[in-house]
Image (spheres, rainbow, N blue to C red):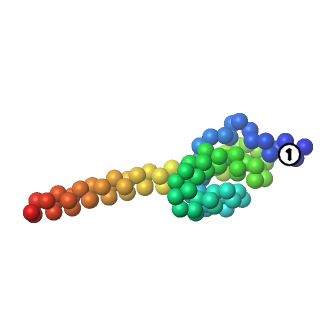
Amino acid sequence: MQENSKVTPQEIKGWNWGAFMFSWIWGIGNKTYLPLLNLIPVFNIVWIFVTGFKGNEWAWQKGNYDSIDTFKQVQATWSRAGLVKFLLVIVGIILYFIFVAGMVATFLNNY
């Protein structure tokens, strides 16, 4: 009977921003250790996406949740934090390119 509770319900499958952006930290927090593979350089470029897609399933199988709703509430917190981090990273990248473009334009105008 215990084994059936580890079958991942269809309604929790899907993308998890927390697992994607916080990878190994999220993994430790959810007692699932496959996200630790994100610490391997180059391999992590692919594995981070696997973590984002499979994270909910791994967390459900390793966790001890009373209900699907409880699980969704916990993962919603991780997902909000992950999405905020993702957006901040994108904004940072855009600002970086604007800064570099400004520096290049200044350099070219001086010569």
Other-residue count near label 1 (Cα within 10 Å), few / some / many at <14 / 14–19 / ≥20? few
* Quadrant of the drawing holding the N terminus: top right
Q: Give left or right: position of 97 versus 111.
A: right
Hey, which quadrant is residue 104 in on the image?
Answer: bottom left
x then y, percent, for residue 101: 23, 56
Residue 15 in view in this figure: yes
Q: Residue at x 82, y 44 (%)?
A: 5
Hey, which quadrant is residue 92 in on the image?
Answer: bottom left
Residue 18 in view in this figure: no
x then y, percent, for residue 81: 54, 54
10 lies above or below 99:
above
Seen from the viewer's position, the closer of residues 15 and 38 is: 38
85 lies above or below 9:
below
Q: Residue at x 72, y 59 (%)?
A: 31
**Residue, far top:** 10
> In this figure, which residue is indicated by the disc labeled 1?
3
Seen from the viewer's position, the closer of residues 27 and 11 is: 27
Q: Give left or right: position of 20 versus 12.
A: left
